[in-house]
Image (spheres, grey):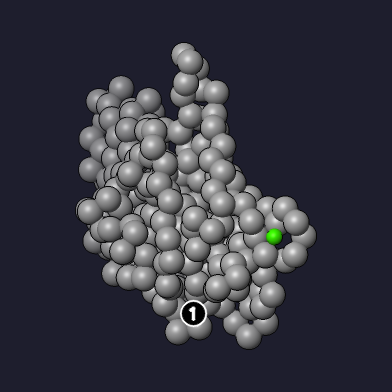
Amino acid sequence: MFAYLFPCNNYPLRLSPSSSEAFQKGGRKGAKKVMIVITDGESHDSSDLERVIEGSEKDNVTRYAVAVLGYYNRRGINPEAFLNEIKYIASDPDDKHFFNVSDEAALKDIVDALGERIFSLEGTNKNEISFGLEMSQTGFSSHIVEDGILLGAVGAYDWNGAVLKETTSGKVVPHRESYLQEFPEELKNHGAYLGYTVTSVVSKALGRVYVAGAPRFNHTGKVILFTMHVDRNLTIHQALKGEQIGAYYGSEINSVDVNGDGVTDILLVGAPMYFSEGREKGKVYVYSLKEVL
Ligand SMILES: [Ca+2]
């Protein structure tokens, strides 16, 4: 998404060269273009308005417009012409793209609504509020494996999180359903943050097994050990659970090969906010890999 903000009140002429230039030079290809016009008065060059709006329609720019009525209200001026002009600037339908506020201080009240509507443009489809891999923060954590690099994506699926793999032959993005066994839909609002950490272990029986932490899962945290298949399915071999709310279990994970034979012996899972003896002292869980896999 590429957004551009115009805090000026004689917008059409100023907006025309700067906006087209900004939209041409900024933003990745295919990004949604969003323009936000915030103004407290009618334009000084409304003859140009039609041309500018037509141009932005052609360029596929979604226009949000915010009318600040403070000046009109304070002077008792009828704002009808002003409101009509701002509604004309806003993309249709007006109820989604047009806002008005009584005075400048009330601008902060619309920030959430505006943000939500703009974010939803980048949603999976049809202006849904729910996200897929948008806003996923892929690369929040990373770990190199034989055939590529594992990437944690804590923001995926409404902050449930996910783990992807980038390989020389393309991305492996597991199906959303493949997480459901350990990250059921009914708990999704808790924002598990799977992918906060990613690493791997080598087991005698299974070879390389990936490990990912979800420190906010059900408030107590969870770590999964899994294999990722090219058909985008996961086999989750085991899930380890935290025990204390807010401890951030799984926010740090480390695998240790004590005797250097290439097979992991110990898996360490950190819970840095673990509360004991009156304060957040933290705790490290030590798992022998024989117990785990
Ligand atoms: Ca070993």
Task: Classify 74 as above or below 199.
Answer: above
Q: Nearer the viewer, residue 281 or 233?
A: 281
| Count of numbered badges drawn on the protein | 1
Q: Which of 66 and 211 lies nearest the eye of the viewer?
A: 211
Q: Is residue 287 above or below residue 145?
A: above
Instruction: Please tell me whether residue 207 is drawn above or below residue 246 in the rendered image.
Output: below
Query: Is 49 in front, or is 204?
Result: 204
Whole-percent x, y for residue 16 in the image: 54, 60
Q: Quadrant of residue 199?
A: bottom right
237 over 241 or under it: above or below: below
- Mark 1 surroundings: few (<14), some (14-19) or many (≥20) residues within 10 A: few
Residue 126 pos. (x, y %) = 29, 69
Percent position of residue 269, x then y: 55, 45
Residue 251 as seen in the image, left or right of residue 179: right
Q: Quadrant of residue 27?
A: bottom right
Residue sitting at the far top: 278
**Amino acid type of the residue tagged 1 in the rendering:** His
Circle 1 sits on which residue?
Answer: 229
- Residue at horizontal 31 percent and vertical 64 percent from the top: 180
Q: Residue at x 77, y 60 (%)?
A: 260
Whole-percent x, y for residue 130 in the image:
31, 59
